[in-house]
Amino acid sequence: MSLIATAQNMQFDAPLPLQSGASICQYALSFETYGTLNADKSNAVLICHALNASHHVAGVYAGQDRSEGWWDNMIGPGKAVDTNRFFVIGVNNLGSCFGSTGPMHVNPDSPSGQVYGADFPVVTVEDWVNAQARLLDQLGIQKLAVVMGGSLGGMQALSWTLQYPERVAHAVVVASAPNLTAENIAFNEVARRAIVTDPDFHGGHFYQHGVIPKRGLRIARMIGHITYLSDDVMNEKFGRRLRDAVAQELAETAGNGRTFGDYKYSTQDVEFQIESYLRYQGDKFAEYFDANTYLLITRALDYFDPARKFGGDLSQALAHASCKFLLVSFTTDWRFSPKRSREIVKALLDNKRDVSYAEIDAPHGHDAFLLDDPRYMGVVSSYFDSIAKELQP
């Protein structure tokens, strides 16, 4: 039986200083909790989300079909992160569009009561971690048994170990990296340009015009989705197959001069299944995600680089971490390749830290961290089993 999830909201009035030098006040964080906090509050697990996810990590909402949390296969009673043993917390980050204060909310400093829009302050991974720490303070949790995340969530988990080393016992970093490669930054920039050049963007103040830059959001999502899948998976799922309707029309019109080579010549129609799939993903994304949030979060991805202040020396940067680590990567993930996880492993070993590392031979690309590979789930489950034995009953 699935967990029943309940979204919660916590208001903060004290200003939160940001890395940019600005600050934000009167902000709220949306979050969910699963399981029970034990007597000495030692079994808390913080889950950090990736780009387009939220605080709804596990379970379902009462009375809502198909409302499973984005990591419901990982978290719940008897699952790898067992909520019978751990108290799991999912937090929606500042700047998001799923409940926490973001560009769609009213700017308290606006004399006319306008929403933030493009005026929402720049946020970083470090800012998110500081906000999460404040939430844990309010929940009375001083030390986390585990901080865990995949992709951008993994960056947050890593940053926790550097910003608050005394507050973390274990960090689980999945399909992540110590910073983005130039190629990754380039993908993010192309996606951002698709949004900001949409005629409906209006410099980020599109809310006032009653429009949404859906075209830009669609293209941004299509670009991102290509990078989340491996070439093998794309070929297996779609190959060069045509949509059924196109294939039928080709059969009916063959030989009448309406074909170009093997395919109907067209500059507008969706003919290949991969095209149809990407457009579907783009259309769906544009209905629920906020354009300014996309710009903010991808910039936070770009900025993250804990080694920068140490002249690029990751080993020196990670000397501040003191907890135990589990890192997991996937062989076909070319967005956050195993090489990047191994950089983190090496830097931790340079500092004689306790590190476990699993490199899973999975075909799914970056999306593998969200899927049900039994070896992956087995590694995480075993690691959490060992942590549970350390805790007070």
Image (cartoon, rainbow, N blue to C red):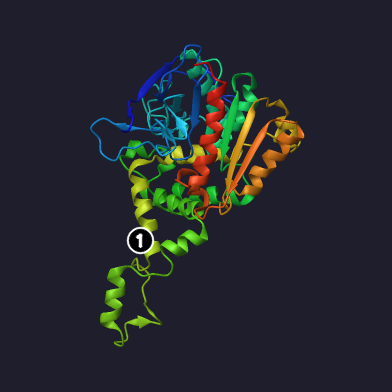
Q: Quadrant of the N terminus?
A: top left
**Viewer-closest of 19 and 175:** 175
**Viewer-closest of 88 and 26:** 88
Residue 326: percent from left, percent from top: 60, 35
**Viewer-closest of 317 and 79:** 79
- From the viewer's perspective, tell me whether residue 66 is left or right of residue 129: left
How would you rate the neighbour count of disc 1 (Cα within 10 Å): few for under 14, some for 14-19, many for 20 or more?
Answer: some
Residue 43: percent from left, percent from top: 50, 20
Q: Is residue 69 above or below residue 106?
A: below
- From the viewer's perspective, tell me whether residue 95 is left or right of residue 244: right
Q: Quadrant of residue 27?
A: top left
- SS label for mark 1: helix
The residue lying at 69 percent from left, 42 percent from top is 343
- Residue type at tag 1: Ser
Q: Is residue 95 above or below residue 363?
A: above
Q: Quadrant of residue 207?
A: top left
Q: Provide the residue designation for mark 1.
A: 276
Residue 45: percent from left, percent from top: 50, 25
